Image: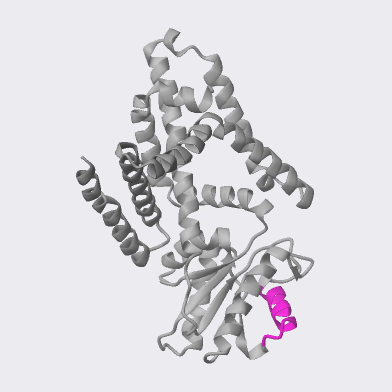
Amino acid sequence: MKEQLIAWYVIPILFFLLFLFLYKVNRTKLTAGLALSCSLISFAGIFLLQAYLSDNSALRAILALVLFPVVLLMAFGVYIFIAFLVLNTRSILRKEKRDIKHILTLLLAIGLILIIIISRSVDYAALPRIAQYFFYSVYGLIVYYFLHLTQFIISIILCNCSRPKKDQRYIIVLGCWITDGRVTPLLARRIDKAIDFYTKQKELCPPPKLILSGGKGSDETCSEAEAMKIYALEKGIPDQHLLLETKSVSTLENMKFSKEIMEMDSGGEPYRCIYATNNYHVLRAGIFARKARLKIDGIGAKTAFYYLPNAILREYIAYLYIHWRWNIVFTMCSLIFGSIIPPIIIQTVFQT
């Protein structure tokens, strides 16, 4: 049996090779992250099983150390997560203006609390079979979206692991809202990330041109691109290395209109480019880049930790909207097959 377990390690290796292939082909899809997750989970499962069957006391100690926090997470993880969401909401409301987009973590916490209350108050055994089917299907849907969100976060992390070569001709800096004609700290981080890449490439070869992309909103005094140019000039970037794209009002238009500028500026010659945005936005921006037929990588600027949970949830909702047809199909499948989830999982996670 122990010899057979060693042979089973080929499974995580195959999953890892699949991950490398998918990551190279298109890192903006969740499939690469899913392959990596399967590789790590299968490796951990085989190793833990091998430790359980082994007579080695050190391996058994590792098994106990790993399983203890897993058991704690299964028992209390949902409550810890709710507490984190509430505290995060408190933090962001102290530092940002009160807006619906800043309370997504609170809404998620309230939803989880309602699920716990319902799951603890319902006697499933006394319900009619169709009512049991309904509840377990809904729980199945919750499990599906939890796992889907997990893979989304993993994919964001993987997209931020990209390290483009320092031989780019252009960097598209994606705009976002401005205040009184000045860039916000969030937008400034995007520009700073592009400038950092610009500076490092300048030490090795001719620096890239920065395409500052962003139109004028109805409540803005100038276009985002013009405000970005003022900031870039203050940071010492020469005017001749700045190109403005002032028509776009969405990320997809950022990519499309910037592509037109690059093709015109390059005179139709081949060119290399990347885009700069915030780290939580790199994945979705990459999706729109491909829609605009730009097979390019992105670099992500760091975001304050208190801001990340809401930003990631907002990105996830936007991602679901992009793929709304597929998500309807998966939602229906989850509702159909969710009732086969054993009640013990629900009791463990929500009724502890």
Q: Check residue 6 for magenta coloring.
A: no
Q: Is residue 232 magenta?
A: yes
- The reply to whether residue 64 is visible in this rendering is yes
In the picture, measured across the screen, residue 93 lies left or right of residue 322, that is right
Q: Position of residue 177 (x, y in %)?
A: 68, 63
| Residue 292 in which image quadrant | bottom left
Q: On screen, 222 above or below 53? A: below
- Seen from the viewer's position, the closer of residues 116 and 229 is 116
Q: Quadrant of the N terminus?
A: top left
Find residue 81 and report its horizontal and vertical position in percent: 59, 38
**Residue 208 image point, x, y percent:** 55, 85
Q: Looking at the image, which residue is at 57% across and 79% down? A: 197
Residue 145 visible in the snapshot: no
Q: Residue 217 is drawn in which quadrant?
A: bottom right
- Residue drawn where x is 48% and y is 79% of the image: 273
Q: Magenta span: helix, strand or loop, mainly?
A: helix
Position of residue 332 measured from the top left corner of the image (x, y, whole percent):
37, 34
Please give the name of the residue rendered at 75% of the width and 82% of the height, measured from the top-left corner. 234
Q: Which residue is at 69% across, 76% downward?
A: 226
Of 137 and 218, the residue lying toward us: 137
Count of numbered marks: 0
Q: Which residues are magenta?
A: 225-237
Q: Quadrant of the C terminus?
A: top right
Applied colour scheme: one colour
Q: Is residue 329 above or below residue 121?
A: below
Q: Furthest residue to the top?
A: 126
- As drawn, is 76 to the left or to the right of 89? left
Left or right? Give the position of 4 relative to 60: left
